[in-house]
Image (spheres, rainbow, N blue to C red):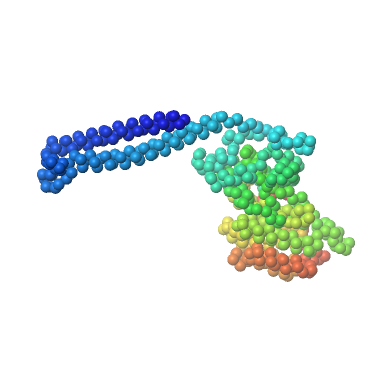
């Protein structure tokens, strides 16, 4: 390769010399023509000539050729430098290509078989998932990003996402289905060596379908960037990684074993009835419920500090851990409209929506605050459907006209005041999550029962169903 550079350099030098010669010859010819045409007088003994027409002393031949040769030298220098740079760039490119060709090819994996170097000690009983998988070529992350823009301009901002958050599918052992979400099923799974850990960790795998369209994939990777940068919080379900090399895309999340807050609240109803009838609750106490609200407020304070708008905060989207800690789930990927949802017409969580979201499609942290107020009401009523006895249309009309849900009899005024403040029509008058958290801090500090479960009016809060055209 150095020989070819030297050869290219000498060819370039010859070329530049030829250019200089021909330029000098051309200047000479012009000068001669001028003389012939009588535009210049004869040169004197000093080599100067008098312009007969303007009687102006000008430098004759030496002046003309001197100016031209300066120009030639500058042009030659510029051309030379540019040429040399071009030769060096081409040389580097050719050397790299040559080096790449010498590398051993990567092993192509077309199935979910566990690779030997990944499997490690087979005695650990770890069994990988065997699942047919598309080749990477047309569904790689790069390909998806490029397709949303131009063919060869992948979005650099999203480039970072893959190396640190992409998890090899063949290190996932998918087990039972946990539930059905908006975008696909959620499974329990075992992940081998995830998040820098050793051995197997139980995770939740959220399947995301319909991601190959440019719009969906762009939005997906944007959200992934957010999740990756989010960090962890005890009251927010942690993001552990993703599989985006082929469809279905998987989101890998912290596994939270206790189910949704909604199901916890509803399950506790039966036990509550038993508790009320037989004295002493065997289920959730008033303090447990206040703690749930407090946990969610802390999670939302964290999310809002990171400028994340949940858009679908409700008890069904809060998970409860084995030690009864609430964790906000399902954020980041919940979007109104068809960014992700491919299969069905968008259904909206109308009963949790602020007026500005319902009527102006506006979503802010303050619309999440409104939803938090409704979630608080869900907690107090052990998972009843908000606006009991009202249809979707009635809820929309009512909210627009300033209707707000009444205080449940068994709910303390302080807690209800907090709910009401979340339902201020002017978003600016609703409290920040930080303030909500502080209010709940103080409620948690006192021993008072803010929710008197012994007087829960089950007849008023039996509504656990929603019309089929609503989201929930
Ligand atoms: P989603 O798509 O978030 O609505 O999830 C549907 C269901 O899957 C939920 O109701 C939960 O029962 C379950 N689920 C979702 N995420 C998790 C998780 N991180 N850990 C355990 N179960 C989960």
Which residue is located at x 63 percent, y 49 percent?
228
Of 323 and 159, nearer the camera is 159
Q: How many marks?
A: 0
Which residue is located at x 40 percent, y 31 percent?
8
Of 331 and 202, nearer the camera is 202
Above or below for 446 versus 40? below
Report if residue 39 is visible in the image.
Answer: no
Left/right placement of residue 339 relative to residue 117 reads: left
Specify the farthest residue to the right. 278
Of 282 and 341, nearer the camera is 282
Of 257 and 200, nearer the camera is 200
How far across and down, in percent of the image, does residue 449 sit?
79, 67
Left/right placement of residue 95 relative to residue 8 reads: right
Report if residue 23 is visible in the image.
Answer: yes
How far across and down, in percent of the image, does residue 198 sit?
73, 44
Above or below for 109 versus 276? above
Which residue is located at x 44 percent, y 36 percent?
88
Determine which quarter of the picture holds residue 408: bottom right
How far across and down, in percent of the image, does residue 319 sit?
73, 53
Determine which quarter of the picture holds residue 167: top right
Determine which quarter of the picture holds residue 383: bottom right
How far across and down, in percent of the image, does residue 197 sit?
71, 45
Which residue is located at x 70 percent, y 59 percent?
296
């Amino acid at each position: 390769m150095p020989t070819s550079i030297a050869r290219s350099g000498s060819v370039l030098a010859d070329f530049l010399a030829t250019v200089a010669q021909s330029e000098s010859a051309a200047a000479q010819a012009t000068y001669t023509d001028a003389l012939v045409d009588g535009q210049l007088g004869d040169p004197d003994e000093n080599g100067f000539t008098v312009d007969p027409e303007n009687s102006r002393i000008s430098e004759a031949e030496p002046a003309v050729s001197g100016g031209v040769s300066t120009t030639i030298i500058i042009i030659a220098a510029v051309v030379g430098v540019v040429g040399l740079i071009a030769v060096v760039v081409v040389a580097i490119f050719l050397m790299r290509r040559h080096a790449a060709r010498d590398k051993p090819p990567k092993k192509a994996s077309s199935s979910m078989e566990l690779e030997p170097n990944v499997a490690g000690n087979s005695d650990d009983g770890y069994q990988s998932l065997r699942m047919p998988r598309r080749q990477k070529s047309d569904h790689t992350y790069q390909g998806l990003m490029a397709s949303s823009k131009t063919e060869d301009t992948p979005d650099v901002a999203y480039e970072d996402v893959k190396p640190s958050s992409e998890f090899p599918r063949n290190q996932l052992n998918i087990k039972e289905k946990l539930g059905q979400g908006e975008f696909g099923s959620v499974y329990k799974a075992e992940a081998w060596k995830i998040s820098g850990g050793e051995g197997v960790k139980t995770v939740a795998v959220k399947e995301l379908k319909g991601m190959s369209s440019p719009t969906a994939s762009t939005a997906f990777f944007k959200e992934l960037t957010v999740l990756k940068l989010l960090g962890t919080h005890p009251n927010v379900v942690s993001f552990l990684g993703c599989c985006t090399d082929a469809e279905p895309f998987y989101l890998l999340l912290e596994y939270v074993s206790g189910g949704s807050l909604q199901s916890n609240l509803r399950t506790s109803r039966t036990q509550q009835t038993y508790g009320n009838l037989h004295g002493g609750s065997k289920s959730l106490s008033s303090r447990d419920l206040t703690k749930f609200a407090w946990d969610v407020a802390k999670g939302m304070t964290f999310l809002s500090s990171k400028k994340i708008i949940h858009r679908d905060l409700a008890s069904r989207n809060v998970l409860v851990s084995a030690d009864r800690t609430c964790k906000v789930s399902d954020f980041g990927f919940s979007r109104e409209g068809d960014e992700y949802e491919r299969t069905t017409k968008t259904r909206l969580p109308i009963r949790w929506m602020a007026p500005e979201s319902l009527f102006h499609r506006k979503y802010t942290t303050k619309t999440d605050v409104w939803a938090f107020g409704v979630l608080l009401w869900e907690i107090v009523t052990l998972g009843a459907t908000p606006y009991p006895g009202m249809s979707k249309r009635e809820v929309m009309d009512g909210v627009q006209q300033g209707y707000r849900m009444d205080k449940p009899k068994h709910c303390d005024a302080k807690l209800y005041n907090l709910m009401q403040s979340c339902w201020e029509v002017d978003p600016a008058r609703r409290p920040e999550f930080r303030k909500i958290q502080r209010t709940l801090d103080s409620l948690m500090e006192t021993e008072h029962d803010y929710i008197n479960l012994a007087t829960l009016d089950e007849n008023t809060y039996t509504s656990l169903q929603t019309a089929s055209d609503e989201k929930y």
